[in-house]
Amino acid sequence: MATSFTERYGTWALITGAARASGLGYTFARHLAAQGMNLVLVDILQVELNQRADELRQQYGVEVRPITADLAFSDFMSVLVQETQHIEVGLLVCNHMYTPADTPKILDMDLATHHRMIDINARAYTTLIHTFGNMMRARHRGGIVIVASGAGLVPAPYTGAYSANKAFQIALGETLWYELKGTGVDVLVVVAGLMNTQGDALSKYPKMMISETDPVVTEVLATLGKRHMVIPGRLNKLFMFLQLKLMSRQQAITSIGSFMTNGLGKN
Ligand SMILES: NC(=O)c1ccc[n+]([C@@H]2O[C@H](COP(=O)([O-])OP(=O)(O)OC[C@H]3O[C@@H](n4cnc5c(N)ncnc54)[C@H](OP(=O)(O)O)[C@@H]3O)[C@@H](O)[C@H]2O)c1
């Protein structure tokens, strides 16, 4: 089945962090499978990943290759290259992330966790983008989606390390977009807001702020190839506008700080 997506990006997409049924990565997988794309799915959660792969095969009739890998491992790319050597990965969705659930302050989080976060959220993003981006540039076609967060544009206290990782992803993606203009490779940075992916973990935040993943993915895929950045959702756009355009940097961080204090139940 040829669709505008397969014509533009070929028939294979690779998505990281796609194992959880409620996660954004699996939503990307479902939408791309519906566009006729075959999928390479990468995640650390083996059982869940194989379940998602079976569901996608049954529901959409596409080919799915699940690869269980710890993206903190310095040599994870050799496994991915081996598993994808006979296919053209035309669309890369860097979506995985690691952050500790208990959201400690920066100095209270142990250094090994800081380093693991940098390995998974920054180093692995760089490795994936460098490897598949070079292959795409050589072929003069491809697409790279980088799932960052509003926390990368306005840093959020209590998730300071995560914010720093997300800021890294945004800077990498925005500059890459510029450098790849005219090469046939599209780059899109996603400045995601809160989404309903984490069960009860976001229960203390106002419900209106939490988006479902389907409209987010629809907006992201509709924007790919048209702009360099997308802030999905009207409320998310409004919040980013308030924080970035109407507040000083210090005011924005202070206001997010109290928002996080309440949302995470820190007081
Ligand atoms: N949900 C939100 O409100 C929100 C807001 C803004 C941005 N985002 C971004 O959206 C993206 C998707 O988030 P999500 O909420 O859908 O999260 P998610 O369901 O937890 O997806 C992340 C996946 O990556 C996996 N992962 C973690 N460490 C890994 C490693 N070392 N190697 C391979 N896989 C690993 C996770 O496994 P484990 O669960 O075992 O760690 C999980 O399956 C992330 O980049 C996130 O930062 C989310």
Image: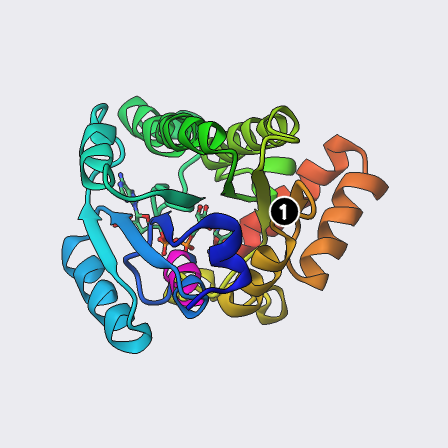
- Look at the magenta stretch and give its main secondary structure: helix
Residue wearing tag 1 = 225
What is the number of callouts on the image? 1
Instruction: Tell me: 178 left or right of 87.
Output: right
- Report the quarter where the N terminus lies: bottom left
Residue 28 spot, x, y in % from top left: 43, 59
Position of residue 77 relative to residue 5, above or below, is above
Residue 67 spot, x, y in % from top left: 20, 47
- Which stretch is magenta? 25-31
Instruction: Tell me: 4 left or right of 34.
Output: right
Q: In the image, what residue occupies the spot 49% across and 39% down?
A: 158
The quarter of the picture where residue 245 lies is top right
Q: Tell me, yes or no, whether the highlighted magenta stretch contains residue 30.
A: yes
The quarter of the picture where residue 124 lies is top left
Residue found at the far left of this picture = 47
Q: In the image, what residue occupies the spot 52% across and 34% down?
A: 140
Q: What's the amino acid at mark 1?
A: Gly
Q: In the image, what residue occupies the spot 42% across and 64% down?
A: 27
The quarter of the picture where residue 62 lies is bottom left
